[in-house]
Image: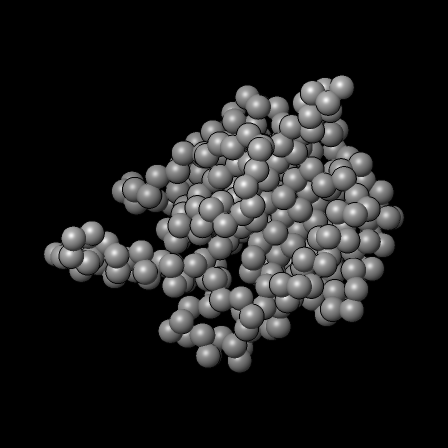
Amino acid sequence: MTEHKEEKNKTLRLLMPQWQGGNNPPYFLGAHLLNWLAPSTNAIQQEVPVSLNEEGLKVEKGIFARSTLLKQLHDAADILKKHNPDRVVVFGGDCGVDLAPIAYLNDKYDGDVAILWIDAHPDVNSPEYFENHHAHILANLLGVGDEEFVAAVPKLVDPNNVLYVGLNDWQPSEKKVMEQFNLSAVLPEDLVEDSSSVLNWLETVNPAKVFIHFDLDVLDLREFRSLLIANPNTYDEMKEKVSKGSSIETIIRVLQDVAKSHDIVGLGITEHFPWDAYALQNMLQRLPLIGDINKDDQPTFNWIF
């Protein structure tokens, strides 16, 4: 009986250090650090092959590194198909790492999956407006955007099953899609006192399963600084300009409250941008005995979201 129960609750922990969707190599390191920092597990663990090689990357059909991203998407889908898990944990990488897992779980559970999109951004952009594919992911899951990415979604996500949590920054092109699908949202200020706004929405939708997409940029940069927006060189300026995000403890409380009342089948944690570790990694590569003393390349990144 115990073996049967365990088989029915098979969990796959997927490491996908994809960076090309945001054109930011530091996400590769960020994903590996997330995986290293996470509690140990008896779950199946597998890594999606992702290269740091920047040669040949170009914009195709309005999307940066389109061919590379499609290959990584299909590799992730193949891993999911091979293991056929009941639950999936994803450590990324840019937000694109959640496309294959959400598509897989939404199909597995016949569309009865609520998506909590915990993110400062709506991620419903499209190639004609923005070339970085990490901002297209939810649109693809809803059936909007590049045809080959949409084709990787066997059962489109029901827009009534999507809730933005902590949303506080969007583009006009994204607002149009949000209005088109009448997507629901809970703003950061609605989460401060309690989790009722999220729990009430879930009670109304009454899904069989829940997937949590957790982009770390939903966190307030004044508390958590391993975010693209928290560039040390412009940090003081950004603290004054950027809207207040959610605290770590607020997001923990919301997710714990959701997990106590609903069946969580997926958790994807994305866009960990470890500024200090990235700088330290570069320094170590250039020191005597452990690195190359002729190497003078300094850490680089792409500021475009």
Q: Position of residue 17 (x, y in %)?
A: 44, 43
Q: Position of residue 259 (x, y in %)?
A: 75, 47
Query: Can you see residue 77?
Result: no
Q: Position of residue 289 (x, y in %)?
A: 16, 53
Q: Residue at x 30, y 42 (%)?
A: 53
- Looking at the picture, the colour scheme in use is one colour
Q: Quadrant of residue 84?
A: top right
Q: Is residue 147 above or below residue 23?
A: above
Q: Residue at x 31, y 56 (%)?
A: 281
Q: Is residue 289 above or below residue 15?
A: below
Q: Is residue 107 above or below residue 286?
A: above
Q: Residue furthest front?
A: 2
| Left or right of 154 on screen, residue 182 | right
| Left or right of 162 on screen, residue 47 | left
Q: Position of residue 62 (x, y in %)?
A: 44, 46
Between 135 and 263, the one lying in front of the other is 263
The quadrant of the rendering that contains the N terminus is top right
Q: Residue at x 66, y 63 (%)?
A: 249
Between 149 and 259, the one lying in front of the other is 259
Q: Residue furthest right?
A: 204
Query: Can you see residue 97?
Result: yes
| Left or right of 235 on screen, residue 241 | right
Count of picture labels? 0
Q: Residue at x 47, y 62 (%)?
A: 226
Between 287 and 231, the one lying in front of the other is 287
Q: Residue furthest left?
A: 294
